[in-house]
Amino acid sequence: MNVNIALLSISLIAIFGFLSEILFRRTNIPDVIFLIIIGFLIGPNGYGFTSPEDLSSIAPVVTTFTLLILIFDGAFNINLSSLIREFSSSLVLTIYNFVLSTLVVGGIFYYIQEFHLGGTSMMAALVIGFSLAGVSSSFVIPILNQIRVGGKLFSRLALESALTDVFCIVATLSVIEVYTTGIFGIQKTLSYLIELFAIAGFIGVLGGIVWIVIRVFEEQNYIITIAYLILLYLATESFGGNGPIAALFFGLILNNSKQLSSIKEGILSRSVEEKKKAVRGDLGIEVTSASEEKFYHLISFFLKSFFFIYVGILLDITDQTALVVGGILSVLIMVVRMASMPLTKGMAGAQRKLVNAVFARGLAAAVLIQAVIQAGMPGADYLARVVYVVIIGTIMLSSLRVFILRLSLAKKDK
């Protein structure tokens, strides 16, 4: 790729990302839709300014880095005190929706492919089920901010989106690991995954503790933290663990450093009053500042912009089968979301409707399906086309339901 074209591309990605966010604020249409449309228009199915082949050399690096930053940045949305406080409601809702969505979406995909479209593998069905089981945090958080949702409902939905992103990544990467290593059988697979997670968890937690202790790079710690994160990823992979999972644990330690360090001080203290302060988190030290977290969000924002433009370039509307299957799965995801109604009985009517209206899939699914392609799984290109259709379909359906809900609430206010 020509240097000038590469620099122009970086500039345009940032500009398009910024403009799409402005359009989202003005029109309530998610920025992801605009980014995918831009990618489609400049891609081979549009005006042909670029093609997937032009980006093939950098795609694996960008995919890995995006996945790393996505899960690291996502960890900053998981606050241990909020998790404990909302444990009985948020976590139950999250696990219920994740498991139900995985089973239904993966099961229906397997049924359609196996009995109507010439067959598929259980591995492919698991990939579809797991990668599409999570509500997109890149969709949920902006939507909630846009309609000014606060309090417990915001915490529940934000926590659900953060956790399901993590669940999707962990589950899909586990399927990829099983495929690439060729380890099959329940006992062998479980043993391997436990080892994988143990290594990743140990290195991630240890890396986080070490980073809290040293904290010597006060001036340039933003970039140094990213460099340190990459080293943790490489170390974990070299020891046979899973790099992104280590990034998750590292992010959790940094985000909850004040609470964790306060608990440590409380354990060491003999004073009852000090122990009470420790429980409240008053004795701890915050390792990351608000500006530092914003910096990580900005990196995630740029990578999101690039990735959805890339998805638009890859989008192939000539594959009618993928369009139909993706459309069916999109509607199915919307219907499955309604099955969470029994778990929201304690909420007000409008809140229950909002919970059911927010179900779009997004960045995690797009990044994960690229990881599946890089792993060389059979039929991965077709799976990717289905996933892209589902991402667009669920975003459109979810946006429509939120829009209708807002209109109905506005009429009631009048």
Image: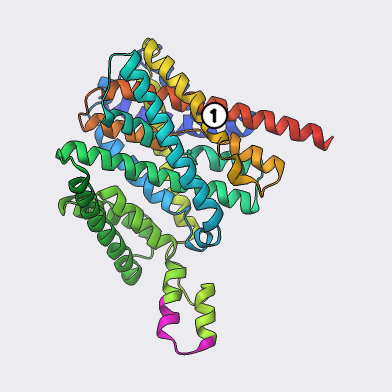
Quarter the N terminus occupies: top left
Q: Magenta region's main secondary structure?
A: helix
Compared with 274, 104 (above or below) is above
Compared with 1, 175 (above or below) is below
Lateral position of residue 413 relative to residue 169, left or right: right
Quarter the C terminus occupies: top right
Lateral position of residue 361 relative to residue 211, left or right: right
Compared with 193, 32 (above or below) is above
Residue 28, position in %: x, y? 62, 31
Lateral position of residue 195 relative to residue 301, left or right: left
In the rendered structure, which amino acid carries the disc numbered 1? Answer: Val
In the foreground, 14 or 300? 300
At 47% from the left edge and 69% from the top edge, which residue is drawn? 259
Q: Which residues are magenta?
A: 264-272
Q: Quadrant of residue 338?
A: top right
In the foreground, 109 or 316? 109
Q: Which residue is mark 1?
A: 335
Which scheme is used to colour this image of the protein? rainbow
- Mark 1 crowd level (few <14, some 14–19, many ≥20, 10 Å Cα): some
Query: Can residue 34 be seen by looking at this rendering?
Result: no
Residue 22, position in %: x, y? 58, 33
At 52% from the left edge and 58% from the top edge, which residue is drawn? 87
In the foreground, 139 or 275? 275
Residue 321, position in %: x, y? 37, 13
- Residue farthest toward the bottom in the current orientation of the protein: 270
Please tell me whether mark 1 sits on a helix, a strand or a loop. Answer: helix
